């Protein structure tokens, strides 16, 4: 398999800019720290040569940025990892941007590192990190280079990767992968196997850390409302700050419900959460329930597919018969 | 701020016996916005209503809360009272303190407490009520009937008789449908053509009816009262206005090998043909798949013999666009293909035929001029076996066939059996049946005549296998009553094939946004109470497109559909239900979730330019609800992730206010 | 939550009822004088599919101990398909609430037709008893809304 490097992407972007196929490039640029890679829009090759970066910290899902970028003049180039391509399709299904204004280049992915993982591995004096094949090498001030297995330290979303297949692109760089399913519901099933009291204690512990920074919502490619209900004084649930423990549950349940059947399980919510709340376990719960009760459905796998919560079958199980729990428990 | 009046009804002792009505009125008085509160023995009485009207005037009330019986009982009454008092009828809320309080809670304290809470919830809601006015839309006084069989003809005639113009779109070159192919009709045995063709002529001569034959609906837009329809009229290569129907061309055309669909391909006609003698319009049509002139450019015989000069080889399909107020689906049925039923050897022997083919074989205008002759050798059959329920009443999981009863087969089989015995008494006739179903006026008498007077052998049981052998058909079947296997050497076998909706119905239903069941029959708005309407307003159902039925039933349903259409078209404007969904365009994402769940197709999208706060402009896709089509279920409001969609009369904040008041 | 003079816990229960079936079923229960606990308070909605999960969470926030949603039987929806959407939505929402540790007996969906007055009363009786047995809702309460 061809390894995608910064140079390959740069060359592709530069040639597309030069030919006038695109006017802008949605890419990554370095942040303050090695793991703080940030999405950025480039309008010329010079800027790209200077600031564009591509390494194992480029986990950000670009699809949501297309809503804004396609409102501008001309075409935008976007690099789509498998995860991003599902969100891309889902946004197209919901008519959120004009496909004609995007040039999508698919790139394969075998997992992206995230900030909290490396910070945990080298809590002090981390100066750099790089990937070398199966190894992740951390440069530290006090302990020198620390080498660990890359695959073993991937964040949860990549360990339990849903798909290595880019499902939407104009052009594919490297070799496309296949749909995988690396036990992504195992953790949900483990939670379901607990008692109600244990589950309540688990979530109370997790959700009580929420500071309502809204990062999960802002990064989520399914949360693209023109005006979020939580920002809307007329909605009856508006709240901008955490003020009671009910609030965090309300927020996260409603948010998960609003994206239920539309969530592509990209895991960005958990990646950006500054409090390390495993928010993807809420979304995966809905996906798991939908799969078990209404048939397998992957949002974004196919453009134009009808989301399960705006659909029905006459033979659907009753609310009291819905399978939801280890060993076929009913809710 | 609203000025709210609360009126607590005693309902005689119905409420007052278990709810302290004074306490309810007193408690309500202290709620915010309440400027007047009282109780009275019978609020719905004239005196009670006058009391409300007086209070509105005296206290300048803007909203009313009536604590009384169920809103299903008197909401309409009190809305009228509000209108009489000069306030908007939708500024009224009912607290149901009778059915859901005094009648079910025997403890006075508990009942009173709950009544107060229900009153408070209604007060909280009425605070957020807004004046609503039903929308009005005009009605185009023209109807479209899709399908020109007996159902479509009857519907069109009735509508036209009432004085409204109506168009019949028929996909075949002539109207008449299946009934035109039938020989005799049960239970009276009068000939189908004798009763149908005069109706066809009536339709052609009625100045309010326009027949658009050889045409299909291609596009439907709009909504009840205002449909816009595109119809494709296929090229028939004959000028309809000029052709006299003399039929000379159909005799002179050298291309003689065109299967005659009207006779179910049992004989041939020419490449230019008139489907049958009484066709309406009686105009020739050229089949472009066989016409030598159209295929090779050489021939032109028909043009040479046509003295009227009606032949036009260059004719093109024509698009007709028209506005309609109502649309009637009358797309009819077809027998299912019986080829899949190997056991009956339909594909192996020409002498195994379907009942509709049998109709043509016994019809005086059919391929044998009405003589019953075997298709294989033209001999007169002496033993005939009829097999009922071929493809009807099959198991739900069966690989072939339909689950439903096709309803008409028992009767037409009895008819066929009787006619054979009447014309050819030397013929033995056997009928294999599962059940004989004869509910209908004079139907059972008819069936019994077949058995008792005409000596038809009815055998309860199914045929297991038919094997063609030495010019005979070996029929093996079981007689369940005698509990034995039967072996009959038959000359002719007639299969009563199940009927299914015409294939054109499904795409049509999609265009009409009318719902269908799993068998592709159109669904009624209500299976019992609104049987001739589709759930989509302005779409009506006539004949077998809604379910299997015989001619008398079809005609009554056709007239019923016409009555509904006439009722609609006689209105100048339609007043809608104002409690419909509404989308806030500033919040709408244009994601289509709402349209996906809307059962009525009331939601459409448009791209709209918005001036943004930074003075830039932005084009966004936004949802639009057509209030004339929306029925106000609210499915869209929950599907909408941004909360842009809300429902008048049951707004998010109104329901939340009720929740808050109840949980306080 | 309410407590009466005997210090007995009395649950607060919100019942969302569809106008065409369950609300009429409740009316029929009334006509037939079929008693059920006064703890049940009905909110009328045009169709069960009008019920937004936010309403249900709102009820819990404001102190409800149980929420029940009643609609037409599948296949009988006045609007042909509304209750099918309700069925999926509520199945998913209630499964999620249970996943967060909320007792599953606090939420219920029940189909009650306009002819089923007896079923309405029996359902409400049963639901109220189950919620009462659970005691006050502590897991979804909002302390700001407590008096």
Image (tube, helix red, strand yellow):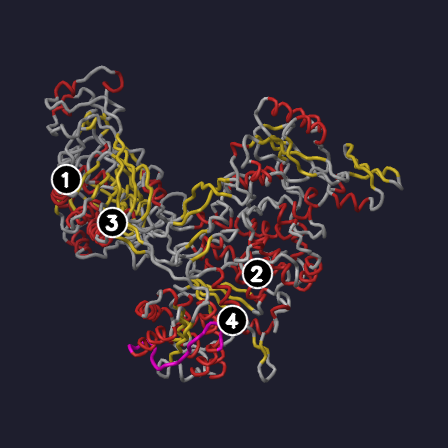
Gap in angstroms between the C-alphas marked 2 and 3: 47 Å
Residue indicated by mark 1: B204
Q: Is residue B525 highlighted in magenta?
A: no
Residue indicated by mark 2: A331
Q: Answer with left or right where residue B432 lies relative to residue B627.
A: left
Circles 1 and 3 on the same chain: yes
The residue drawn where x is 59% and y is 53% is A255
Q: Answer with left or right where residue A90 lies relative to residue A111.
A: left
Q: Position of residue A159 (x, y in %)?
A: 70, 43
Gap in angstroms between the C-alphas marked 2 and 1: 63 Å
Structural crowding at the residue carrying mark 2, measured as other residues with C-alpha within 10 Å and reported as few (<14), some (14–19) or many (≥20): many
Structural crowding at the residue carrying mark 3, measured as other residues with C-alpha within 10 Å and reported as few (<14), some (14–19) or many (≥20): some
Q: Is residue B31 highlighted in magenta?
A: yes
Q: Chain of mark 2?
A: A
Considering only order in the chain, which callout, 4 or 3, is on the residue closer to the N terminus?
A: 3
SS for dot 3: loop
Residues B520 and A122: in front is: A122
Circles 3 and 4 on the same chain: yes
The residue drawn where x is 57% and y is 39% is A68
Structural crowding at the residue carrying mark 4, measured as other residues with C-alpha within 10 Å and reported as few (<14), some (14–19) or many (≥20): many
Range drawn in magenta: B30-46
Q: Is residue B339 above or below residue B643?
A: above
Quadrant in the rendering for residue C97: bottom right
The quarter in which the C terminus of chain B is drawn is: bottom right
**Front of the two marks 2 and 1:** 1
Q: Is residue A15 above or below residue A158?
A: above
Considering only order in the chain, which callout, 3 or 1, is on the residue closer to the N terminus?
A: 1
Q: Answer with left or right where residue B358 lies relative to residue A175.
A: left
């Amino acid at each position: 398999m061809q390894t995608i490097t910064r140079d390959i992407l740069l060359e592709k972007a530069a040639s597309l800019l030069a030919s006038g196929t695109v006017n802008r490039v949605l890419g990554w640029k370095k942040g303050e720290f090695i793991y703080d890679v940030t999405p950025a829009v480039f309008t010329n090759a010079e800027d790209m040569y200077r600031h564009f970066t591509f390494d194992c910290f480029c986990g950000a899902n670009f699809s949501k940025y297309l809503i804004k970028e396609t409102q501008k003049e001309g075409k935008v180039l976007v690099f789509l990892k498998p995860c991003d391509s599902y969100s891309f399709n889902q946004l197209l299904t919901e008519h959120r941007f004009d496909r004609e204004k995007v040039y999508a280049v698919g790139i394969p992915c075998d997992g992206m590192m995230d900030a909290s993982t490396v910070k945990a591995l080298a809590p002090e004096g981390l100066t750099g990190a790089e990937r070398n094949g199966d190894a992740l090498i951390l440069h530290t001030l006090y302990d020198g280079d620390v080498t660990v297995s890359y695959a073993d330290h991937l964040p949860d979303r990549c360990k339990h990767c849903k798909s290595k297949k880019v499902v939407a692109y104009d052009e594919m760089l490297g070799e496309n992968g296949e749909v995988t399913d690396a036990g992504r519901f195992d953790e949900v099933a483990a939670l379901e196997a607990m008692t109600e009291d244990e589950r309540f204690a688990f979530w109370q512990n997790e959700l009580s850390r929420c500071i309502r920074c809204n990062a999960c919502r802002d990064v989520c490619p399914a949360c693209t409302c023109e005006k979020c209900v939580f920002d809307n004084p007329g909605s009856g649930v508006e709240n901008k700050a955490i003020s009671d423990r009910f609030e965090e549950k309300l927020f996260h349940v409603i948010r998960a419900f609003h994206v239920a059947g539309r969530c592509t399980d990209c895991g960005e919510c958990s990646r950006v959460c500054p409090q390390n709340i495993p928010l993807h376990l809420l979304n995966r719960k809905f996906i798991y329930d939908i799969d078990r009760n209404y048939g397998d459905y992957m949002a974004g796998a196919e453009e134009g597919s009808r989301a399960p919560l705006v659909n029905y079958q006459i033979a659907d199980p009753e609310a009291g018969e819905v399978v939801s729990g280890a060993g076929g428990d009913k809710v | 701020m609203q000025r709210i009046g609360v009126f607590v009804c005693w309902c005689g002792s119905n409420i007052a016996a278990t709810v302290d009505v004074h306490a309810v009125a007193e408690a309500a008085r202290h709620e915010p916005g309440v400027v007047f509160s009282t109780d009275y023995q019978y609020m719905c009485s004239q005196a009670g209503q006058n009391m409300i009207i007086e209070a509105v005037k005296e206290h300048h009330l803007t909203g009313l809360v009536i604590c009384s019986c169920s809103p299903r009982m008197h909401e309409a009454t009190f809305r009228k009272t509000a209108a009489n008092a000069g306030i908007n009828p939708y500024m009224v809320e009912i607290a149901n303190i009778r059915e859901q309080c005094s009648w079910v809670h025997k403890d006075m304290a508990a009942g009173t407490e709950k009544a107060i809470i229900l009153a408070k919830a209604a007060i909280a809601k009425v605070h957020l009520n807004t004046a609503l006015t039903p929308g009005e839309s005009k009605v185009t006084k023209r109807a479209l009937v899709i399908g020109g069989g007996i159902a479509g003809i009857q519907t069109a005639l009735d509508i036209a008789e009432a004085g409204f113009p109506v168009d019949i779109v028929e996909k075949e070159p002539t109207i008449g449908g299946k009934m035109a192919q039938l020989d005799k009709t049960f239970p009276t045995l009068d000939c189908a053509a004798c009763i149908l063709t005069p109706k066809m002529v009536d339709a052609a001569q009625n100045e309010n009816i326009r027949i658009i034959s050889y045409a299909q609906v291609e596009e439907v837009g709009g909504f009840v009262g205002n449909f816009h329809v595109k119809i494709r009229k296929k090229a028939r290569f004959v000028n309809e206005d000029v052709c006299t129907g003399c039929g000379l061309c159909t005799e002179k055309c050298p291309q003689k090998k065109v299967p005659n669909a009207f006779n179910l391909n049992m004989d041939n006609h020419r490449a230019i043909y008139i489907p049958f003698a009484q066709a309406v319009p009686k105009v020739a049509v050229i089949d472009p798949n066989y016409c030598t002139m159209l295929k090779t450019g050489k021939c032109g015989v028909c043009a040479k013999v046509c003295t009227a000069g009606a032949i036009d080889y260059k004719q093109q399909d024509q698009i007709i666009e028209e506005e309609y107020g109502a649309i009637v689906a009358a797309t009819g049925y077809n027998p299912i293909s019986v080829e899949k039923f190997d056991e009956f050897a339909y594909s192996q022997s020409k002498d195994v035929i379907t009942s509709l083919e049998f109709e043509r074989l016994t019809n005086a205008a059919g391929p044998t001029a009405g003589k019953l002759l075997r298709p294989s050798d033209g001999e007169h059959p002496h033993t005939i076996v009829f097999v009922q329920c071929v493809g009807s009443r099959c198991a739900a999981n069966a690989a072939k066939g339909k689950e439903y009863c096709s309803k008409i087969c028992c009767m037409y089989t009895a008819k066929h059996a009787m006619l054979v015995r009447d014309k050819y008494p030397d013929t033995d006739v056997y009928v294999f049946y599962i059940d004989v179903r004869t509910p209908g006026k004079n139907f059972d008498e008819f069936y019994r005549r077949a058995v008792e007077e005409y000596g038809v052998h009815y055998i309860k049981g199914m045929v297991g296998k038919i094997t063609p052998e030495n010019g005979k058909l070996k029929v093996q079947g079981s007689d369940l009553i005698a509990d034995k296997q039967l072996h009959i050497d038959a000359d002719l076998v007639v299969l009563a094939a199940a009927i299914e909706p015409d294939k054109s119905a499904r795409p049509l239903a999609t265009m009409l946004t009318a719902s269908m069941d799993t068998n592709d029959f159109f669904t009624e708005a209500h299976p019992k109470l609104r049987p001739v309407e589709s759930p989509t307003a302005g779409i009506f159902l006539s004949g077998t497109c809604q379910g299997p039925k015989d001619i008398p039933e079809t005609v009554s349903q056709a007239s019923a559909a016409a009555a509904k259409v006439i009722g609609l078209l006689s209105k100048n404007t339609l007043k809608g239900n104002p409690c419909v969904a509404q989308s806030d365009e500033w919040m709408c994402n244009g994601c289509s979730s709402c349209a996906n769940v809307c059962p009525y197709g009331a939601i459409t999208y448009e791209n709209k330019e918005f001036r943004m706060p930074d003075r830039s402009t932005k084009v966004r896709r936004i949802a639009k609800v057509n209030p004339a089509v929306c029925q106000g279920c609210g499915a869209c409001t929950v599907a909408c992730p941004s909360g842009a969609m809300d429902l008048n009369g049951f707004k998010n904040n109104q329901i939340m206010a009720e929740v808050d008041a109840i949980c306080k | 939550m309410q407590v009466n003079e005997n210090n007995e816990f009395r649950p607060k229960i919100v019942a969302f009822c569809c106008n065409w079936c369950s609300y009429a079923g409740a009316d029929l229960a009334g006509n037939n004088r079929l008693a059920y606990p006064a703890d049940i308070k009905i909110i009328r909605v045009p169709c069960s599919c009008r019920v937004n999960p936010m309403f249900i969470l709102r009820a819990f926030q404001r102190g409800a101990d149980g929420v029940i949603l009643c609609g037409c039987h599948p296949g009988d929806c006045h609007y042909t398909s509304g209750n099918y959407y309700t069925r999926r939505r509520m199945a998913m929402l209630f499964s999620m609430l249970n996943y967060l540790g909320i007792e599953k007996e606090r939420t219920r969906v029940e189909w009650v037709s306009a002819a089923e007055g007896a079923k309405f009363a029996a359902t409400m009786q049963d639901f109220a008893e189950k919620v009462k047995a659970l005691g006050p809702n502590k897991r979804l309460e909002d302390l700001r809304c407590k008096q």
